[in-house]
Image: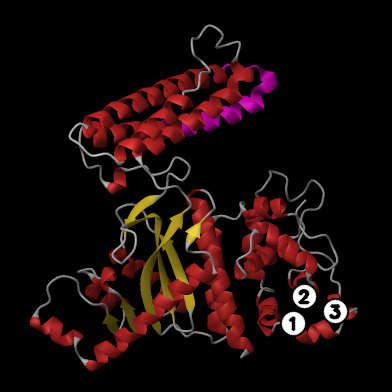
Amino acid sequence: MLIDRHPYEDVFARVPELAGQTDPVLRHLDRLLDDDVLYAQVRADLATRYPQTLVHGRHSTPVEVLLRLLLIKHLYRWSYRETEARVADSLVLRWFCRVYFQAVPDATTLLRWAHTIRPATLHALNDRVVQLAHQARVTSGRKLRIDGTAVQTVIHHPTDSSLLADGVRVLSRLIRRSKPVVQEACAGVRDAFRTRMRTMRGGLQTLHRLRRRTGDDQTARRVAVYTKLVAATRATVTQAQGVLAALHGADSAVKGQAVRLRAEIARYIPLVEQVIRQTERRVFAGESVPATEKLVSLFEPHTRIIPRHKGGAAVEFGRLVVIDEVEGGIVTRFAVLADKTGEQGQLAPALAHHRRLFGKAPRLVTGDRGVHAAENEVVARAAGVRHLVIPRSGKLTATQQAREQTRSWRRRYRWRAGIEGRLSSLRRDYGLRDCPDHGEEGLVRRVGWGIIASNLRHIGQKLAA
């Protein structure tokens, strides 16, 4: 049964000198988190973990404790296990997280509760934090700057051969796990549970050796190896489809296990088939497959190829995230961009969101050249923005060039550079460099909690100054 909080205990009664040594930022954050709106938004999601979470079962970890533990985790960029250990060892953190002298929740317990919080709730939580910053006069919302960054997913570098091998390995593992459930149903099927990983490993090693050789015949030899790899992968997909059909008629005694296996196999078969198709297009037909049509990971299929226009690697594998920042270092909005969506179309939603939070349009809006779009001037004027300072892309007219060289325009544009530092801080200090969480929802949770932690720290530091 979901409970709200533990009974209050005075943690510092036994060690009163700790009260004076507590970080002032944590003291101010403690008061900020005593907010009914924040609490209600999180509680509504936690209540959906099981159908009867609100009324039945033993007492759960309190909602108040879960909210504060998740915030502490992202505030200090700890793992779930490290969060458990650190809070258990610190009286100050026990006081802040409202654990008091109760048992600290296990890392796996915290992880499972964290997965019940929806991405939409994190957007709403950040909106509430921005409102608290406005009330505390940390920001007035007079200036707005927009920029984007790539949040990488934790995947190996994708190649056609490695993706084919991943598909065979995963499907073979699921087929092997299904054998006790469907062995009788597949008794007359030849090679029903055969694994082809030895063929795949041999092909990968051959391709690795061919990469270091030169000669006119190497392309033909490489195509021959890929032909074997694709044939082995397609045969494994056929096996998986047969096992999937057999799982539908599984005995009721193993129905739960059969349902789980069925879901896993049904999830991976279309992905492996897509890998086969893109390999045939690229290797056999010689096509250049567009980046938006490529699958670069079976395990993180939402991953996209993001071109880098800076030094280092030519591309990154992850998702492009756009953030809006106002003065005071407060990030008011974040958005994980969909396919065929760039920073150019983000001005209108940014201004609409800003007006909803602050009740007015910002006086100054700025961004880099990537945010420029032809309709920006019209959108900004209609929203009531006084100064739109975004450099135009492409060839400039003499009037446009003269305008961008004026002292006032350049002074306002210099304020934009601060968002580069904010992005660097979010990547370095709050975990936005990469995302070990799984799925697109996991990535949104990672980004959302990191931004909320950053905003709360800035509010606490401002109030403590």
Q: Residue at x 55, y 73 (%)?
A: 454
| Residue 412 in picture, x, y percent from top left | 31, 87
Q: Which residue is mark 2?
A: 92
Amino acid under disc 2: Val
Mark 2 lies on a secondary structure that is: helix
Q: Is residue 11 magenta?
A: no
Q: Secondary structure at mark 1?
A: loop
Which quadrant does the C terminus fall into?
A: bottom right
* Labels 1 & 2 near each other (Cβ < 8 A): yes
- In the image, what residue type sits under mark 3? Phe
| Residue matched to label 1 | 22
| Residue 295 shows in the view | yes
| Residue nearer the viewer, 31 or 40 | 31
- Upstream in sequence: badge 3 or badge 1: 3
Marks 1 and 2 sit apart, C-alpha to C-alpha, by 7 Å
| Left or right side of 127 for 366 | left
Relative to the observer, which residue lies in front, 399 or 148? 148
Q: Is residue 269 magenta?
A: yes
> Within 10 Å of the Cα at label 3, are there few (<14), some (14-19), or many (20+) other Cα atoms?
some
**Residue 125 screen position, x and y as percent:** 56, 66
Marks 3 and 2 sit apart, C-alpha to C-alpha, by 8 Å
Q: Earlier in the sequence, mark 1 or mark 2?
A: 1
* Picture coordinates of residue 434, whole percent (x, y): 48, 59
The residue that label 3 is drawn on is 12
Where does the magenta region start and end? 248-270
Relative height, residue 149 to residue 11 (above, below): above
